[in-house]
Image: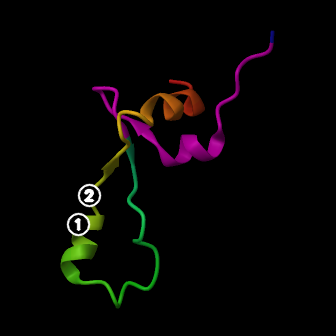
Amino acid sequence: MPKMKSRRGAKKRFKVTASGKIKSRRAYKSHILTSKTRKRKRNLRKPAYLHKADAPRAHEMILE
């Protein structure tokens, strides 16, 4: 049986933390930043964590 392949797009977007949570970049931080407040842009720098219900699917995609 051949090896399972990871989904490369997911592999690049998600990281697994030491506790097993899935960390990702936040959305809405790529363009049209002039209309967003300083506070909102500052909060978008913080990493986002996937919801517990979505984590198993992400784990499967990145095979970890």
Along the horizontal axis of the image, is 37 left or right of 7?
left
Q: Tell me the residue that label 1 is attached to.
A: 43
Q: Tell me the residue that label 2 is attached to.
A: 46
Question: Vertically, is 8 above or below 29?
Answer: above
Q: Position of residue 31 (x, y in %)?
A: 46, 80
Q: Where is residue 27 in the image (x, y as percent from the top left)?
A: 42, 64
Based on the displayed image, in which of its 4 quarters is residue 29 positioned?
Answer: bottom left
Q: Nearer the viewer, residue 49 or 18?
A: 49
The three-letter amino acid code for the residue at tag 1 is: Asn
> Disc 1 and disc 2: Cα gap in Å?
6 Å
Name the residue furthest top: 1
Q: Residue at x 26, y 58 (%)?
A: 46
Name the residue furthest right: 1
Name the residue furthest bottom: 34
The range drawn in magenta is 2-22
Q: Which residue is drawn at 64% across and 31% down?
A: 6
- The crowding category of the residue bearing disc 1, from other C-alpha atoms within 10 Å (few below 14, some 14 to 19, many at least 20), is few
Q: Position of residue 35 (x, y in %)?
A: 34, 90
**Tag 1–tag 2 contact (CB < 8 Å):** yes
The three-letter amino acid code for the residue at tag 2 is: Lys
Name the residue furthest left: 39
Q: Nearer the viewer, residue 24 or 57?
A: 57
Picture colour scheme? rainbow
Q: Which residue is drawn at 34% across and 27% down?
A: 20
Q: Which quadrant: the N terminus?
A: top right
Q: Secondary structure under badge 2? A: loop
